Amino acid sequence: MSYSEHFVINNSLRPGDAIMLKKKFFGMFDHFTVYLGREEYTNRPVFAANYTNGVTILTDKEVNHFLQTLEPTKIDRFNGTNHQRDLAVQRAFTYKDSKNYNLIFNNCEHYKNFVQIGRKYSRQVNTASNTLLLSGGTAVVAGLASKNSKVAGWGLFALALGALAKLAADQD
């Protein structure tokens, strides 16, 4: 029995549940993969993720690699009826093989939330945008107060990036 099979059974995963994974040492970003149920003919667990190659149905080898090299830190259970769960799995497959991964505009968390709640949202991008907005605003004020146009300019640049990231975080 594969590591992924054990993981599904031990954690009572149901289709639409998502797994949050972190790098075991100093992981700065969370990675998400979504459990979609079992393959019809082989009965193997099926997982999907949006990562550098786009939305992909992961092979057993990829799932086992993720679960063994990254640390599963949380399971985001799907909240909804069985019918809503079926719709979530259908949503997951609508982006299968799309190649539009982007760390800021379309990452694995955007995909996970699209599957689970029908909304592309990334908490991680939102947090980064808040940090950029706060540090940019602070730099602008400090630059203006000290009459340092370079600091104020960098602050404005950070504010613009923060505003762009804010739009990317929640695409509904």
Image (cartoon, grey):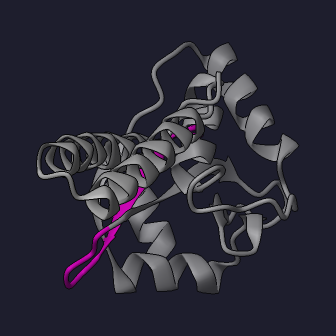
Query: Is residue 24 or residue 11 the one in the foreground?
Result: 24
Q: Residue furthest front?
A: 147
Q: Is residue 161 visible?
A: yes
Query: Is residue 145 or residue 15 the one in the foreground?
Result: 145
Which residue is depicted at the point 43% across and 44% down? 162
Query: Is residue 98 or residue 19 the one in the foreground?
Result: 98
Query: Is residue 124 or residue 15 the one in the foreground?
Result: 124
Q: Residue 18, position in %: x, y? A: 47, 47
Q: Is residue 140 left or right of residue 96?
A: left
Which residue is depicted at the point 57% across and 62% down? 103
The answer to which image quadrant residue 102 occupies is bottom right
Q: Residue 72, position in %: x, y? A: 31, 65
Q: Is residue 139 left or right of residue 91?
A: left
Report how many numbered discs are placed on residues in the image: 0
Above/below status of 61 relative to 140: below
Question: Looking at the rendering, in which quadrant would you find the C terminus?
Answer: top right
Q: Is residue 1 visible?
A: no
Above/below status of 89 relative to 52: above
Magenta residues span 15-28
Which residue is depicted at the point 49% across and 44% down? 160
Q: Residue 109, position in %: x, y? A: 51, 48
The answer to which image quadrant residue 130 occupies is top left
**Does the stretch in magenta take in 19?**
yes
Q: Residue 57, position in %: x, y? A: 75, 64
Above/below status of 31 relative to 144: below
**Does the stretch in magenta take in 16?**
yes
Which residue is depicted at the point 75% across and 74% down? 53
Q: Is residue 163 left or right of residue 118?
A: left
